[in-house]
Amino acid sequence: MDLLYIAPLAGIVALLFAAYFMNSVLSESSGNERMKELSQAIFEGAMAYLNRQYKTLIPFTVIIFAVLFFVDGYKLAISFLVGAVFSAVAGYVGMTSTTKANARTTEAARHSLNKALSVSFRAGAVMGLSVVGLGLLGVSVLYIIFGDPVVINSFAFGASAIAFFARIGGGIFTKAADVGADLVGKVEAGIPEDDPRNPAVIADNVGDNVGDTAGMGADLFESYGATAIAAMLIGNTLYGVNGVLFPLLIGAAGIFGAIVSIFLVRTGEDGDPQAALNRGLWSTNFLTAIMAYVLSTMIFGDKGFGIFIAIVAGLVVNVLVGMITEYYTSSAKAPTQHIADACQTGAATNIIAGIATGLRSTGLPMIVFSAAIWVAFNQAGIYGIAMAAMGMLCTAGMVVAVDSFGPVADNAGGIAEMAELGPEVRKTTDKLDAVGNTTAAIAKGFAIGSAALTALALFTAFGEEVAKNPKLSGLLVNGHLVINLTEPTVIIGLFLGATLPFLVCAMTMEAVGKAAFEMIEEVRRQFREIPGIMEGTGRPDYAACVDISTKAALREMLLPGVFAVGMPLVVGFLMGAKALAGFLAGATATGVLLALFMSNAGGAWDNAKKYIETGKYGGKGTPAHAAAVIGDTVGDPFKDTSGPAMNPLIKVAGTISLIIAPLLLS
């Protein structure tokens, strides 16, 4: 069999297994009528948001398609459109799976922990396998049709554009609902989380899926496509067709490793769901490494071992970044417990401790990234750097599955609370939800690490494309683009690139603040004006809160998108290739650091609150708990909006730069 066709075949197999797991989930019972009603409300809210988001993006997509078509031909335009459409399809499939699985997980929790884990994890596996299946299928089929990795690099741009808006819009939606539900419901009204009397509770449950399923899935779909194409471009220059095919084969290896490992995620009634999920992650890495060794030595001969080591460096980043993220965000570890301790003296000391923890948490991951880059480059040159990124991303099927399991478990607990099921059911769903909080933090670390390595691969590919541009031959030294940091244009580009992530963070934080203000006012209005809410005899208007989050998310996501897409174009065409290279370096460095800082600080604040809620420092209802809720509220947009927005931001800049490299004039 021609090796070229293994990749699309693997993509199809991934989609077939996604369909199998979807059918497996849908065959389970949804419980009683109240559970079905709640699940349907969450599903309808999630689908309404996605429909409106993608309708909002249609004009943007059509304009870019037209520009690409008239500037550089139909191949780039079609590749862009396929990337955008496939990203949207993955979002729809994953969101359908997770929102259909929540009540089914709750019902399964009435029977056993393993059954609840199986339903929720298989729902997540639908999203994971859809992301890698559509990603590999899209890239490989476009390459088969067009035969040139250069003309399909806009696939990554299409995926990047959708991912950026999905990440920002989803983050604004979920945090507007979460902040409104917490500050009015938990702090002002003193009612529990997921209490059906809270008008924002359905919007909050919708937001879990919008942010952590559709948003994360789009983020890693983009990384997957961009990394594969960057590796193909570099491989084409260095190794010809073998260098192009190899990243696709590694993607196929990761898919087969994930499919096998999904069946290993099981636990006993008194078992640890985290251990079961870890077994799936470790198995995926191990199986992928074995297949990578066989493929690299078979295709590259003596040079294959160095390329294999580069791939292993990426797989090691997977493990280490997850461990570091867990250390800084887990309630069982010292940093988060220190933040909880600081809550005893009020919200201010809590905020200070959380910011310090987030800042400190950037050090070790950056050392890990640097070590992986050094190992990969020394073993296989610039191709090794790209393959380290591909090694990390090829396990995305399992990582997205583990991440998407979290919102299902969270929703299942909410439905158990709102449907007034027994404490034994909530005990099971709480056990899954606690694991989901940890896996969400680990997945965020994975997303940041993959974004860092993907951005570096795109940067390297950008240099290679600049070297092929005959108009830029005067910039080359020994056939390569060399950046001199003493040149004013490079420094200007560096400063502008370093500024962009801060501007986008500011815009997204303010967007959450505005949307949360609207949500808070609406929840207060309903408590004030709808008779019988607090007594449980009046029904809150859940749809009004979902609508507020939806409108705010779609309104506020556009301006950051304009900055993300526009600034690389302005710098590249006005100041030239060297300034754009400086811009990419600055945006990548500060973007990765901000992502680590904000995601880890937010995760630590969240788990510090949960640590106190277990009874530490007096538990719920104490001043320490009130301070922890405030810290968690600040941390919400940190970890779920602004921090995650950095990942697609730096990749959007890289993919746009790669597309315009042949068009630059200086």
Image: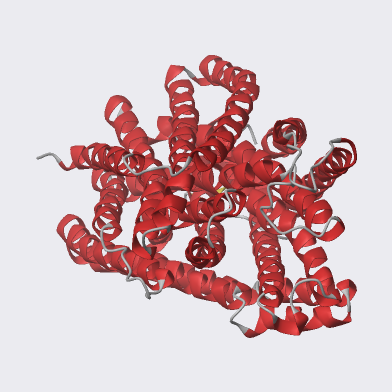
Q: Quadrant of the N terminus?
A: top left
* Residue 477: % across, % down: 53, 53
- For residue 135, what is the image quadrant? top left
Image coords of residue 60 (percent x, y): 64, 22
**Scheme by which the image is coloured:** secondary structure
Q: In the visual, does 605 lie left or right of 253? A: right
Q: Identify the residue at image location x=40%, y=74%.
A: 272
Q: Residue at x 55, y 36 (%)?
A: 37
| Left or right for 567, reference 59 | right
Please indicate whether residue 454 sits to the left or right of residue 485 in the image. Answer: left
Residue at x 43% of width, y 35% of height: 93
Image vertical order of residue 392 relative to residue 496, above or below: below
Which sits in the foreground, 398 or 78? 398
- The answer to whether 385 is drawn above or below residue 347 in the figure is above
Number of labels in the image equals: 0
Q: Is residue 190 visible?
A: yes
Q: Position of residue 428 (x, y in %)?
A: 47, 65
Residue at the outermost left position: 1
Viewer-nearest residue: 105 or 302: 105
Work out which quarter of the rendered image holds the C terminus and state it.
top right
In the image, 28 versus 495, the foreground residue is 28
Residue 574 visible, this angle: no
Relative height, residue 398 to residue 312 (above, below): above
Residue 462 at x, y percent in the picture:
52, 45
